[in-house]
Image (tube, rainbow, N blue to C red):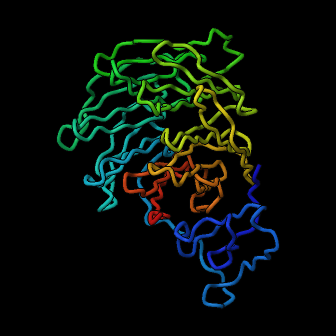
């Protein structure tokens, strides 16, 4: 297990050994957290500047800040890079459309009757937006001119904090996994908007607790995706969507699984966070079992969100301690802490061209251009 130690190193201070991340992973002036194994024999000088002066360099700053949300930001979704827009959902149920060129809010509408927005998904080709909120509805929105009009909805049984997950299947190509009551997960077909399967372990609600987070697990052989669900008890269950049966289950965390993300099946590594200090790395074996790979202990407890960049090289977490943590996915080495927000960071999201956005309880969205050269 690796522990984040309190040594902040700049690029010129990083020990150059075989275990160090390559130079291309470092952005100028970026502060790095280095694991204890890399600190052997190294005494960092926190006040050394790259030009030899004694004044410390400033920490990395956001490229820009999006202001105007009147409530904590709870969900983010980039549209296609060519459109240059970002969607955000808020705790008060509103959805904002941001123009990233002018950095202004172009459209705001109440989508979930004052309840927090948990999920946003944009289908740019069809001008369709899907959202899910704690009002218990998964909604479809049609972009008509400058406005969004409601184009239907699915009533979900659950009103917890678990966002839904889209799934790809051969026979039914457009599925969505929605959290139901207690520990149940309901699978809906999006075109017909009908229920096609219910996933229930048969255990008492107190044994697993609520569904807290989910992610799709692609199959390397090209078969149907599986669904990995994290529960309030700390247990994770891998479900076979085709049969509705459990493939494997494991007690990965000691407390509620707050967030999870999975890479491509070729890279085969996932990350999950809980209410404690532990960030757990895991993989899915050829036999379809959840296998813990590594555990990282953070200085402060609580993870709200975790995302893996599309190229599987970088992962980021959103913390209760107001910080965004950046990791090298191959070595799981902590690379940087991005400290800007004044309150808990609720959500993080990568664009197709690797820009990073983070939404916070402080009503702000920070946008970062970091490690994109990797």
The front one of 320 and 313 is: 313
In which quarter of the view is residue 324 placed? bottom right
Residue lying farthest right?
Answer: 41
Q: Is residue 104 above or below residue 7?
A: above
What number of labels is visible?
0
Is residue 23 depicted above or below 172 in this figure? below
Please tell me which residue is depicted at 56% across the width and 16% down the height of the picture: 184
| Residue farthest to the top, as pictured | 202
Instruction: Find residue 217 and report its horizontal and vertical position in percent.
Output: 50, 31
How far across and how far down the image is residue 93, in percent? 43, 35
Residue 130 at x, y percent in the picture? 34, 32
Q: Where, by quadrant of the figure, is residue 293 drawn?
A: top right
Classify residue 33 as left or right of residue 137.
Answer: right
The one nearer the camera, 66 or 168, is 168
Tell whether 138 sits left or right of 53. Answer: left
Q: Which residue is pictured at 45% across the width and 32% down the height?
A: 114
The answer to which of 4 and 87 lies nearer the viewer is: 4
Q: Nearer the viewer, residue 326 or 106?
A: 326
- Image position of 303 with respect to 255: above or below: below
Pick out the residue farthest to the left.
145
Which residue is drawn at the image coordinates 61% and 65% (left, top)? 21
Instruction: Tell me what residue is drawn at x 42 percent, y 24 percent.
Output: 224
Q: Quadrant of residue 205?
A: top right
Q: Give percent across and percent down for residue 112.
A: 41, 30
């Amino acid at each position: 297990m690796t522990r984040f130690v309190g040594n902040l190193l700049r690029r010129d201070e990083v020990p150059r050994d075989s275990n160090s991340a390559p130079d291309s992973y470092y952005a100028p002036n970026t502060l790095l957290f280095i694991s204890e194994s890399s600190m052997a024999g190294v005494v960092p000088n926190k006040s050394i500047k790259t030009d030899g002066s004694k004044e410390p360099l400033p920490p990395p700053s956001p490229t820009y800040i999006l202001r105007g949300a009147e409530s904590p930001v709870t969900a983010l979704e980039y549209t296609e890079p060519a459109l240059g827009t970002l969607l955000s959902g808020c705790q008060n149920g509103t959805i904002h459309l941001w123009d990233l060129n002018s950095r202004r809010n172009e459209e705001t509408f109440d989508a979930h009757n004052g309840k927090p927005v948990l999920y946003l998904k944009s289908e740019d080709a069809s001008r369709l937006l899907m959202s899910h909120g704690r009002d218990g509805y998964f909604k479809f929105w049609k972009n008509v001119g400058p406005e969004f009009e409601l184009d239907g909805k699915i009533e979900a049984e659950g009103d917890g904090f678990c966002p839904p997950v889209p799934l790809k299947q051969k026979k039914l190509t457009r599925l969505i996994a929605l959290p139901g009551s207690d520990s149940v997960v309901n699978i809906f077909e999006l075109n017909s908007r009908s229920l096609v399967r219910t996933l229930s372990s048969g255990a008492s609600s107190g044994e697993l607790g609520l569904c807290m987070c989910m992610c799709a697990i692609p199959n390397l052989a090209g078969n149907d995706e599986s669904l990995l669900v994290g529960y309030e008890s700390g247990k994770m269950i891998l479900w076979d969507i085709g049969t509705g049966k459990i493939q494997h289950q494991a007690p990965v965390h000691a407390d509620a699984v707050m967030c999870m993300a999975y890479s491509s099946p070729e890279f085969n590594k996932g990350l999950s966070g809980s209410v404690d200090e532990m960030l757990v790395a895991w993989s899915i074996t050829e036999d379809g079992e959840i296998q813990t790979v590594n555990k990282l202990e953070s200085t402060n407890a609580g993870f709200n969100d975790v995302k893996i960049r599309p190229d599987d090289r970088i992962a980021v977490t959103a913390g209760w301690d107001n910080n965004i943590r950046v990791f090298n996915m191959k070595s799981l080495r902590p690379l940087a802490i991005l400290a800007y927000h004044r309150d808990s960071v609720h959500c993080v999201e990568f664009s197709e061209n690797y820009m990073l956005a983070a939404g916070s309880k402080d009503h702000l969205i920070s946008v970062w251009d970091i490690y994109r050269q990797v």
